Amino acid sequence: MSRKEIGEATGKEEMLYRLSMLTNKHLVEINHRYQIVEGNDVEDIRRAFLDLPGDKVNEILAEYAEAGSITCYIYVLDDDASSFIKKDSQKITNELRATIQPISDARPIVINEARHLPRFNEIWIDAISLSGKYSYYKFFDEHNKKKPVELQKRRIVENIAVRLNIEHGFLVVRTSDNVLADKVKTIVMSIVGGTADRLHFSNEDVNSILQWAASIRGANFRLEREVSAISMTAGRDKVSGAIHSLAEAGDFHRYREEGELVSVYIHIQPGKEGAHIPDEDEKPQPDEDYIGFRINFLGGKIYFKTALSETEIREKVKEVWANVKIKRPTPSPEYKLYRYIESTRGGESKADI
């Protein structure tokens, strides 16, 4: 696969595809914020994007198109790496920006951009992985906007948004693919130096998360018996229509004692501290008014089923992080040696050592 193919797949066609993935809720929100068209007709808003300047589109994509319903793989950095990124965050950003991975790989990963954003205390990394598969999406003719919507064929591009948290020393890789997440982590840590392991949830951490969440909509258990796995979903009250919490269900606690809680699915209302349990006289809210996400305790990942903005995702990841007692990995002897040499030689780059 050539660099030209990668470039062609990530040009305007890719931009239009990413815009097509925005939810109606976010399209209306964007229109209200940027005054793109009069009214809130979502099809008019989508078409109007074709007339926006490229820098304005990129501004919108930075807030929304890297978000949406996505899986976040969370990695904990060792203490030395965490200290290193606080000390040399701009240097790390520059090295990440200059990193180009081999394109001979069957699923090459290319870093498009790396940005140090002090206001978020994070380093943002935008990457892609190009596959040989194709999908279809709606396309609006740029020159004839009255022409009916057509389905266009496109090469599947996995957009990978990476957030390196400088303050707390953790790495979040947003991708739907477990293997790609680990590959991206390896690339980033080859620049940062050190070790990063998936976030581990102890039994105490799980209890803390369940207490914080309060309202649990679903759960998966692993059991050591004839039935090896059980999935549970909360039901609705027959009178009020309010959704029950599995935390109130006896079977939920029984299966926790008999086996291992693999994951939980939580519904919370935006802006509320933790999850929200409706009062008896409270009318049930439509699903679109909630934020829904699944925490996988064994895989160290969070899956946001509800399409969210950049800010909402960042806040929820931090809230989960705050409920876990972090155990940082031990750096390998090779990286300890590298850091020792780097400190004695004035902090040259790895290429100079």
Image (cartoon, helix red, strand yellow):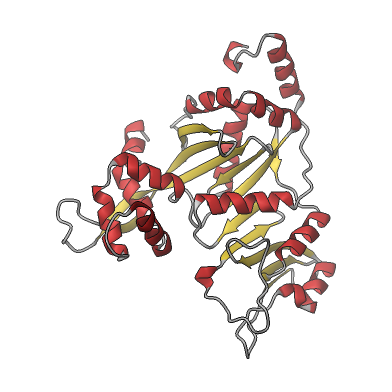
Which residue ends up furthest to the top in the rendered image?
A: 345
Residue drawn at point x = 42 percent, y = 59 percent: 26
Quadrant of the rendered structure where residue 163 is? top right
Quadrant of the rendered structure where residue 237 is? bottom right
- Answer whether residue 106 is visible to the viewer in this image: no
Quadrant occupied by the N terminus: top left
Quadrant occupied by the C terminus: top right
- Answer whether residue 162 is visible to the viewer in this image: yes
Depth check, front residue: 181 or 266? 266
Depth check, front residue: 130 or 240? 240
Q: Looking at the picture, how far across and down is residue 25, in whole percent?
A: 42, 63
Residue 187 falls left or right of residue 6:
right
In this rendering, the answer to whether 48 lies above or below 275 is above
Q: Looking at the picture, how far across and down is residue 307, in whole percent?
A: 49, 60
Q: Looking at the picture, how far across and down is residue 302, in whole percent?
A: 62, 55
In this rendering, the answer to whether 234 lies above or below 205 is below
In this rendering, the answer to whether 226 lies above or below 62 is below
Residue drawn at point x = 68 percent, y = 26 percent: 84
Residue drawn at point x = 50 percent, y = 69 percent: 288
Residue 47 falls left or right of residue 268:
left
Residue 54 falls left or right of residue 236:
left
Residue drawn at point x = 45 percent, y = 40 percent: 128
